Image (tube, rainbow, N blue to C red):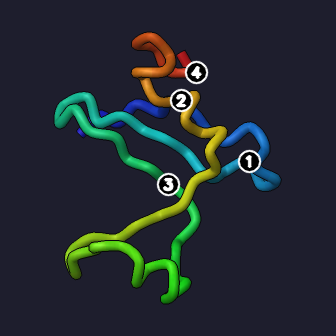
Amino acid sequence: MALRRLGKDPESKSGGSPTIYLDEKKDTYLVQGWKVDDMERLAQLDLPRHETVVEIPRRMVQFFLEVQGGKGADD
């Protein structure tokens, strides 16, 4: 599986997260972010047991290819 890193959060204090990847083979995004474990917030989601959710800041939307015009910020 060849993952393509599209961008890391430029404001991350540690420089390692959140990050957005593209799986070009499956044509899907993988999002590395902060684990959501606030039960009140999770209760508002229709989240099946086999799924999870992570949180990223709004500013990360810039890294999705649809916003970048087809190229990731790391290209």
User: Residue 32 — which label?
Assistant: 3
Please identify, in this view, whether the residue under mark 3 or under mark 1 is nearer the observer: 3
| Quadrant assignment, res 60 | top right
| Nearer to me, 16 or 59 | 59
Q: Distance between the residues labelled 4 and 3?
A: 16 Å
- Measured as percent of width and height from the top left, residue 62 is found at 58, 28
**Vertical arrangement, residue 12 with respect to residue 43, above or below:** above
Question: In the image, which disc is placed on residue 63?
Answer: 2
Left or right, 70 with reference to 73: left
Q: What element carries label 3?
A: strand
The residue carrying pointer 2 sits among few (fewer than 14), some (14 to 19) or many (20 or more) residues within 10 Å by Cα, namely: many
Please state which amino acid type lies under the numbered disc 2.
Answer: Phe
- Return the residue at label 1: 15
Q: Position of residue 21 (x, y in %)?
A: 42, 38
Q: Mark 4 points at which residue?
A: 73
- Mark 2 or 4: in front is 2
Whichever of labels 4 and 3 marks the residue nearer the N terminus, that label is: 3
Dots 2 and 4: beta carbons under 8 Å? yes
Identified by mark 4, the residue type is Ala
CB contact under 8 Å: marks 4 and 1: no
Residue type, mark 1 in image: Gly
Residue at horizontal 18 percent and vertical 31 percent from the top: 25
Relative height, residue 41 to residue 15 (above, below) = below
Q: Position of residue 48 (x, y in %)?
A: 21, 76
